[in-house]
Image (cartoon, rainbow, N blue to C red):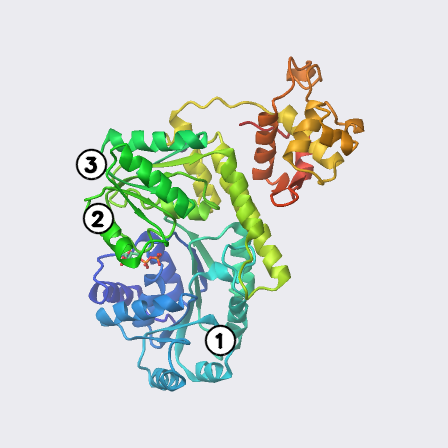
Amino acid sequence: MALATMDEARHVLAERFGYASFRPGQEALVEAVLEGRDVLGVMPTGAGKSLCYQVPGVAAHGMALVVSPLVSLMGDQVRSLLDAGVRGAYLNSTLTPGQQGTVMRRALEGAYDVMYVAPERLADPRFTDFAAQADIALVAVDEAHCVSQWGQDFRPSYLAVGDFIATLPARPPVCALTATATGRVRADITRLLGLRDPLVLVTGFDRPNLGFAVERLEPKRKIARIAARALASPAESGIVYCSTRKDVERVHEALVAAGVPATRYHAGLAKEERAANQRAFIDDDAPVMVATNAFGMGIDKSNVRYVIHHNLPGSMEAYYQEAGRAGRDGEPSECLLLWSDGDISTCRFFIEQESGNEELTPEEADAVRATRRRMLETMVGYCYTVDCLRGYILRYFGEPAEGGCGNCGNCTGGVEAVDVTAEARAVMRCVHELRGRFGKGIVADVLRGHASDRVEELGLSACGCFGDLAEGAPAGPAGTPLPAAVPAARIREVVELLAAGGYLVVTEGTYPTVQLGPRFREAAEPGFSLAM
Ligand code: ADP
Ligand code: ZN
């Protein structure tokens, strides 16, 4: 028997939440949950994931138990539920044991429709005893990607969620939700939460009014590029994201000097100044905001006409979330990513340096680093791709995309694809022969037949691939001799491109290395080709 009918759900949606209709993804998820089916919903931030469990929680007999890692937000979430007349509560370490006891007692009396809990709570016998007696209509798992080591925010405490669900006496439907889930993460969510034949729904990632573009620029030319865009329509609102506070200061100062009405935001500013600058931006007194990624959470400014990234973000997730702050009103808006080679090294350096989350064992921390490396490579792939940028984004998030969008830099700019298959094969052979022990510089020197001191010292001028991309080597079209050695910069680019495709892995740090990646064998197959 259904937990409630869709008519009842629509009634709750209108009466309590004040919305005329479900968004398409919500409708399908709510319907499945009400029929008792497990679901996995992948939707971007702002798509409206919360309603997918709040509405069933209200409509059904019994409550929605929501597992959420965002302890600091639970209070706000519950307060807005209460404002809407929905009976909500939360249970986490900010409550005293006495308060927790009261909440559980009231829950057993049927006082709540929606109850939030932190994952740590699920292993507490006091809580499991309570849950065994409570009337739980459904379990919602928010930020479900936290259960996977292959996701960006792995939390060991999430591993307890699956066991908890399995031990509930009447196994209720489970509604797992996330904004970020690659195929591997989705498989992990299904397996580790013990979802049964879930309805998997990926929706809402496409933003047709956003025009994407990527430009590779020398660092010193980036600010002029940003100033030119801002001054082309000075009244328009835009956000410029920088990766460090120092860059925010530098870029902001230069933009103001160029006459751009800009303000700034980063965690190093005093609270009052942050608030004042944010206000100035929202009110269009300072239409351009230069900020670190600390800016934007919970800011709902609809008329942002462009988002420019001054540096390369660490993942497609981060990029799309930040870029997606443009054009909330549906009007045409631009998302421009500026990048330089140095950005990639900086990101890699951060990944290796990161001491990480203290909850993690060394093995888990290694897995997280490996994940971050892969996420960065996908981001680099976006910079290099000659295909439709929107298609690249949508496919990354698991939404089907075919053909060009006609509204991105690659669809409209007529980028000339350069075939670099021969260079790529040479690089792969070289990395294989050098057994992943050296960095990009050595790989380039060896391939170009450049007997530098370092190359001689390591005895590498004797290796088989030495000079494979030197002048006269048979690596030109159809095996013709190269008229000149392939430039070192091009070889480095090909290395990056191969890393983006998973054929190589590049590490940065005290001993930078280029190693074979998980897909290295595919690069040796006859059909392999690479363009940039
Ligand atoms: P998410 O959890 O996916 O980031 P939220 O649940 O916070 O998104 O919802 C984002 C915004 O969309 C909220 O302001 C919410 O009120 C609004 N919203 C959600 N569903 C609907 C709907 N069916 N109709 C109109 N607005 C909606
Ligand atoms: Zn396109």
Residue at horizontal 75%, vertical 26%?
466
Location of the N terminus by quadrant is: bottom left
Q: The residue under label 2 is which amino acid type?
A: Ala
Label 2: element kind? helix
Q: Where is mark 2, residue-wise?
A: 280
Identify the residue at horizontal 25%, vertical 56% (top origin).
21
Name the N-terminal-most of marks 3 and 2: 3
Find numbered disc 3 in the image and state the secondary structure of the residue it sits on.
loop
Q: Which residue is mark 3?
A: 235
Give, as a three-letter code, the residue at label 1.
Leu
Whether residue 465 is visible to the viewer of this picture, yes or no, is: yes
Looking at marks 2 and 1 on the same chain, the residue that comes earlier in the sequence is marked by: 1
Q: Real-space Cα distance between discs 3 and 1?
A: 51 Å
Crowding at mark 1 (Cα within 10 Å: few <14, some 14-19, many 20+): many
Rendered position, 374 above or below 151: above
Mark 3 is surrounded, within 10 Å at the Cα level, by few (under 14), some (14 to 19) or many (20 or more) other residues, namely some
The disc placed on residue 122 is 1
Quadrant hosting residue 509: top right
Q: Which is more foreground, mark 3 or mark 2? A: 2
